[in-house]
Amino acid sequence: MSLKNSLLSAASVGLASGSALAQSANTPATHPMSHSVGSGVKCFGVNTCKGSGTCVVTKEQITVANQAFKNQFSKAQAHECGGNNGCGAKAGYLEWIKKADKAECFSAGGFVFEKKVDSKTKKESLVVKKS
């Protein structure tokens, strides 16, 4: 490939990448702690084995889940990419799987996170909702 063709190819890739980034910047982001995901909910605690979980588990979610479930998720680590759990929830790894609604999540033995606002301090915190 000649130098001219290489430069044209690189310029084309750069333009395509810039266009893709501009489009993604205009796409609304979902809040990582929101329990809603599209037309379903983020159901935590029902992931079965390696690679079955989905994206974004925060340190705050791990801390709150461990407080609610007596350190059941002690092996969990915060991450932003799906399939990062070592294995199932029963083995100590916190992940979420999309379920149709809270009822389906609860019947599977899972839980969701909800935001709670303290009426006095107006401070927002994360809580576990089991049913």
Image (tube, grey):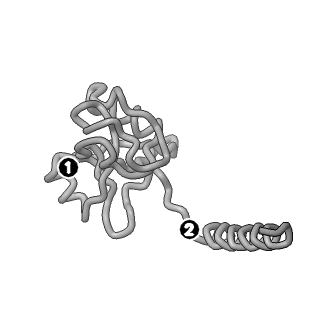
Q: Is residue 98 above or below residue 120?
A: below
Instruction: Give percent across and percent down for residue 106.
Output: 18, 51
The extreme left residue here reads 107
Check disc 2: other Cα within 10 Å, few if <14, some if 14-19, many if 20+: few
Instruction: Name the residue located 82 percent from the left edge and 69 percent from the top edge.
Output: 2
Tally the numbered discs: 2
**The one of 66 and 84 positioned closer to us in this rendering:** 84
Instruction: Name the residue located 38 percent from the left edge and 62 percent from the top edge.
Output: 37
Q: Secondary structure at mark 2?
A: loop
Q: Is residue 23 left or right of residue 7?
A: left
Instruction: Give percent across and percent down for residue 29.
Output: 54, 62
**The one of 38 and 48 positioned closer to us in this rendering:** 48
Q: Is residue 80 left or right of residue 104?
A: right
Residue at the spot of label 2: 28
**Amino acid found under the numbered disc labelled 1:** Ser
Q: Is residue 72 above or below residue 54?
A: above
Instruction: Give percent across and percent down for residue 62.
Output: 39, 35
Residue at the spot of label 1: 131
**The one of 123 and 84 positioned closer to us in this rendering:** 84
Spatial distance from mark 2 to mark 1, Cα to Cα? 29 Å
Instruction: Name the residue located 30 percent from the left edge and 58 percent from the top edge.
Output: 98
Q: Is residue 36 above or below residue 120?
A: below
**Amino acid found under the numbered disc labelled 2:** Pro
Which quadrant of the figure has residue 126? top left
Which quadrant of the figure has residue 49? top left
Check disc 1: other Cα within 10 Å, few if <14, some if 14-19, many if 20+: few
**Residues at circles 2 and 1 in contact by the CB criterion of under 8 Å:** no
Image quarter where the N terminus lies is bottom right
Q: Is residue 6 above or below residue 62?
A: below
Q: Is residue 87 left or right of residue 77?
A: left
Instruction: Give percent across and percent down for residue 24.
Output: 61, 68
**The one of 127 and 50 positioned closer to us in this rendering:** 50
